Image (cartoon, helix red, strand yellow):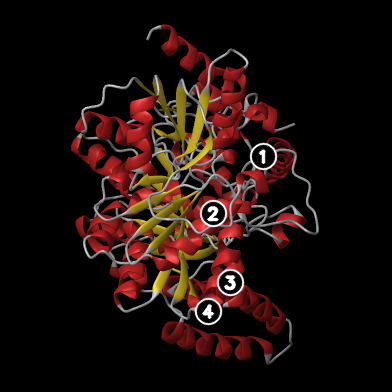
C-alpha cells in the first residue's frame, strides 16, 4: 500500500500524479473505516483528500506553514505527516486529536477548533516571517462556511492592504455543517457556476472542432461571445478588491491542476486566494447524499432511516418553542450556522419566516437578537456553549446594558467528550454570572427544561438556559407541573449533615452520592440549584445555618462558577459554614469519553463521595 510508505510529506515527491491519485483512494478507504468505527468528522475530510495531498506535495513541510481553519478537516494531513500508526486511536484518550494541535506534531502549525481563525493566524505568521528575514510560505485552508465569519474579512482586508505574501485556499464545497447562508454564499455559487460552465464549454468546443469545414469558425465565434458574457456576469473582482490575486475556481479533486496552481501561488510574492471547488463526502455515497448527517458521526455509527439529526435537548427546547410561538407572534429563533445541531430545524419547519440562520457569526447573531428585542420581539438564540464565548462583548454591551429580553438556549454545555478542549462548554456559567441583569438557569432534565422555557416568556430581561447535548427524563417522581418562580431552588432530598447544591445534569449524580453516603450513616440532602443567578438566598441561608457541610456540584469551571457564587454569598453574609466546591479544575480538559473527562475532573460519583468523606473527616 502506498499510504504505509508515506512517513512525511517529503515522501510524496517521489510519486507520480497517477500514484498520488491511487493514494487518494487508499486514504478515502482509511478515513471511512476509521471514522465510522471511532467517530469524528467524515464528510469534510473526504472532500479534501486531493487538495491536502497537493498541498503537502507542493510545500516544504514543516518549514512552510499550513494552517487549517477549524482543523476538523485535517485527518488527511495527519495521515500524510507520520501519524498513520496512531490514526486508529483518533479522538481517544491519549490518541490523536480530532483537530490540529501544535503539541501533537511539528506539522500542525496552529491549534484550532473554531471557525474563522486561520487567515488571521496565518497573517500573523507571515508577518513574523518577514520581520525575521524568512522566506517560507504560509498557507491558510479555509472552508466556504467559515467565510460567513466576519473575522475572515478583517484578516483579508488587512493582508491585502499591507500586501503581505500569503496564500488562502478557499475550500468551497457549498456546505459548512448545514447549508451555507448569506450573500457570499450566493456569490460563490455564481463562481461555481462559471466553473461548471467552463467545463461544459470545453466539451462543446471539442465537439464543434470535429465538424468539418464550419466547426472551427463556429467554435471561435461562440468563444468570443462566451468571453464577453463571462466578463460581464461572472468574472470575479471581489477578492481582487481586497488586494488578493484570485485564482479559480479550480477542480479541488484534480491533483495535477492543483499542483500547478499551488506552485503558481507559491511564486507570486503577494497575497493570493485559490478558489478550489470540492465535493463534501466524496467517495462515500451516503456522505455525498447526506453531508450534514455525515459531518460528524459518533463511534460505531450505522445509518438509520429514522435518524434523529438534532440533539435531544435541542429538539425538546425547539418543540417547546414551537408551542410557545403558536400563541405569541413575537417568538423568533436564531442560530449561527447550527440549525440541525441546536434543533432550530424543528422550529424552522413550522415557522420558517420566524427562524434565522445568520451564518458563522456569533457576534452578529447576538446583536441581531438584541435589535429584534428592542423592536418588540421575543428572540431565542440557540447556540453551542463553546461558540457563545465569541459573543461576550455583544452580550454585555448590546443585550444586558439595555436589559433586553433575549433568551439564550445554550446547547452542548458542560463536558462534551471527543471534541475536547476547544469545544468544552464549561465556561458559560462563569462569564454569564458577571453580567448585570442576566438570569442564568440550568435544568436537571427535559421536563425542567420545558418549565424554564415557559418561565422565560414571562420575563422582561436577558435569560440564559444552558443544557448538555443529551436529554434525560428523571421521571414524574422528581418532576412537577407547578410553574417555576424566578430564583427558586428545589429540595429533592432532605439531609441533616451534608447538603449538595447541584446544578443541571449534576443533580442525578448528586442523588446517587446521597444514597451512597446514607449507607455510611451520613445524612446528605440534595437541592436542585437550577438558578445560578439569582440564587435562592432564603434556602442558602437556611442551609448555612443547619448543615455541617455545604457542597456545590457543577459541570462548569470552578473559577467564577456556581460554587464561587455560593462562596461569595457566604462570605458577604458572615457565614463560616464549611464549603466544598466541586467542578471543572483550572486547566483545559482534553478529548476522550465524557465518562473519562468526568473522572479526571473528580465529578463522578465515586470521586465526589471520597471528596465529601475526606472533608467530613477533617471538620
Q: Which secondary structure, mark 1? A: loop
Residue drawn at (44%, 41%) of the image: 529
- Compared with 382, 204 (above or below) is below
Residue 223 figure quarter: bottom right
Q: Which secondary structure, mark 3? A: helix
Q: Which secondary structure, mark 4? A: helix
- The answer to whether marks 4 and 2 mark residues whose Cβ atoms lie closer than 8 Å is no
The residue that label 4 is drawn on is 327
Residue drawn at (29%, 74%) of the image: 374
For marks 3 and 2 on the same chain, the one whose residue lies earlier in the sequence? 3
Note whether residue 378 is visible.
Answer: yes
Residue drawn at (32%, 63%) of the image: 461
Q: CA distance from mark 1 to mark 4?
A: 41 Å
For marks 4 and 2 on the same chain, the one whose residue lies earlier in the sequence? 4
The residue that label 2 is drawn on is 449
For marks 1 and 4 on the same chain, the one whose residue lies earlier in the sequence? 1
Between 168 and 356, which is closer to the camera in this rendering? 356
Q: CA distance from mark 3 to mark 1?
A: 34 Å
**Residue 46: image x %, image y %?**
65, 49
The residue that label 1 is drawn on is 39
Residue drawn at (38%, 31%) of the image: 543
Residue 323 is labelled as 3
Amino acid at each position: 500500500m502506498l499510504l504505509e510508505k508515506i512517513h512525511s510529506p517529503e515522501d510524496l515527491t517521489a510519486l507520480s500524479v497517477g500514484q498520488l491519485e491511487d493514494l487518494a483512494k487508499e486514504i478515502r478507504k482509511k478515513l471511512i473505516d476509521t471514522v465510522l468505527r471511532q467517530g469524528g468528522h467524515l464528510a469534510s475530510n473526504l472532500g479534501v483528500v486531493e487538495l491536502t495531498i497537493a498541498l503537502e506535495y507542493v510545500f516544504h513541510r514543516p518549514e512552510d506553514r499550513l494552517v487549517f481553519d477549524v482543523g476538523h478537516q485535517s485527518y488527511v494531513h495527519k495521515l500524510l505527516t507520520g501519524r498513520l500508526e496512531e490514526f486508529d486511536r483518533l479522538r481517544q484518550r491519549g490518541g490523536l486529536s480530532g483537530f490540529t494541535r501544535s503539541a501533537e506534531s511539528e506539522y500542525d502549525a496552529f491549534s484550532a477548533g473554531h471557525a474563522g481563525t486561520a487567515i488571521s493566524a496565518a497573517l500573523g505568521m507571515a508577518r513574523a516571517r518577514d520581520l525575521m528575514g524568512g522566506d517560507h510560505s504560509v498557507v491558510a485552508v479555509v472552508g466556504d462556511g467559515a467565510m460567513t465569519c466576519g473575522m475572515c474579512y478583517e484578516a483579508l482586508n488587512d493582508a491585502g492592504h499591507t500586501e503581505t505574501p500569503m496564500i488562502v485556499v478557499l475550500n468551497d464545497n457549498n456546505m459548512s455543517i448545514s447549508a451555507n447562508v448569506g450573500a457570499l454564499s450566493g456569490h460563490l455559487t455564481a463562481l461555481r457556476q462559471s466553473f461548471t460552465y467552463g467545463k461544459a464549454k470545453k466539451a462543446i468546443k471539442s465537439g464543434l472542432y470535429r465538424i468539418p469545414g464550419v466547426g472551427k469558425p463556429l467554435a471561435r465565434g461562440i468563444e468570443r461571445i462566451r468571453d464577453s458574457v463571462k466578463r460581464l456576469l461572472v468574472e470575479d473582482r471581489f477578492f481582487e478588491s481586497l488586494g488578493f490575486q484570485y485564482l479559480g475556481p479550480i477542480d479541488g479533486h484534480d491533483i495535477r491542476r492543483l499542483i500547478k496552481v499551488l506552485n503558481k501561488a507559491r511564486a507570486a510574492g503577494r497575497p493570493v486566494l485559490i478558489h478550489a471547488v470540492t465535493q463534501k463526502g466524496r467517495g462515500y455515497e451516503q456522505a455525498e447524499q447526506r453531508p450534514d448527517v455525515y459531518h460528524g458521526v459518533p463511534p460505531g455509527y450505522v445509518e438509520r432511516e429514522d435518524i434523529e439529526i438534532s440533539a435531544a435537548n435541542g429538539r425538546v427546547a425547539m418543540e417547546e418553542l414551537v408551542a410557545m410561538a403558536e400563541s405569541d407572534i413575537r417568538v423568533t429563533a436564531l442560530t449561527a450556522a447550527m440549525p440541525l445541531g441546536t434543533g432550530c430545524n424543528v422550529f424552522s419547519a413550522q415557522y420558517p419566516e420566524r427562524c434565522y440562520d445568520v451564518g458563522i457569526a456569533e457576534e452578529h447573531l447576538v446583536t441581531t437578537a438584541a435589535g429584534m428585542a428592542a423592536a418588540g420581539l421575543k428572540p431565542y438564540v440557540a447556540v453551542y456553549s463553546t461558540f457563545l464565548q465569541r459573543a461576550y462583548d455583544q452580550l454585555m454591551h448590546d443585550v444586558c446594558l439595555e436589559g433586553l429580553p433575549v433568551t439564550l438556549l445554550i446547547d452542548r454545555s458542560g463536558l462534551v467528550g471527543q471534541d475536547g478542549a476547544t469545544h468544552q462548554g464549561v465556561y458559560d456559567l462563569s462569564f454569564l454570572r458577571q453580567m448585570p441583569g442576566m438570569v442564568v438557569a440550568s435544568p436537571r432534565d427535559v421536563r425542567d427544561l420545558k418549565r424554564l422555557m415557559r418561565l422565560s416568556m414571562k420575563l422582561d430581561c436577558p435569560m440564559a438556559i444552558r443544557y448538555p447535548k443529551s436529554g434525560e427524563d428523571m421521571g414524574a417522581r422528581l418532576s412537577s407541573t407547578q410553574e417555576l418562580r424566578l430564583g427558586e431552588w428545589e429540595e429533592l432530598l432532605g439531609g441533616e449533615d451534608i447538603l449538595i447544591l447541584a446544578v443541571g445534569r449534576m443533580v442525578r449524580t448528586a442523588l446517587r452520592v446521597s444514597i451512597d453516603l446514607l449507607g455510611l450513616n451520613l445524612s446528605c440532602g440534595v437541592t436542585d440549584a437550577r438558578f445560578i443567578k439569582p440564587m435562592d438566598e432564603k434556602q442558602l441561608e437556611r442551609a448555612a445555618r443547619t448543615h455541617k457541610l455545604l457542597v456545590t456540584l457543577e459541570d462548569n469551571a470552578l473559577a467564577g462558577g456556581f460554587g464561587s457564587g455560593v462562596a461569595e454569598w457566604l462570605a458577604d453574609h458572615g457565614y463560616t459554614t464549611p464549603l466544598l466546591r466541586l467542578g471543572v479544575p483550572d486547566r483545559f480538559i482534553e478529548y476522550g469519553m465524557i465518562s473519562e473527562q468526568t473522572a479526571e475532573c473528580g465529578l463522578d460519583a465515586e470521586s465526589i463521595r471520597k471528596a465529601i468523606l475526606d472533608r467530613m473527616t477533617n471538620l
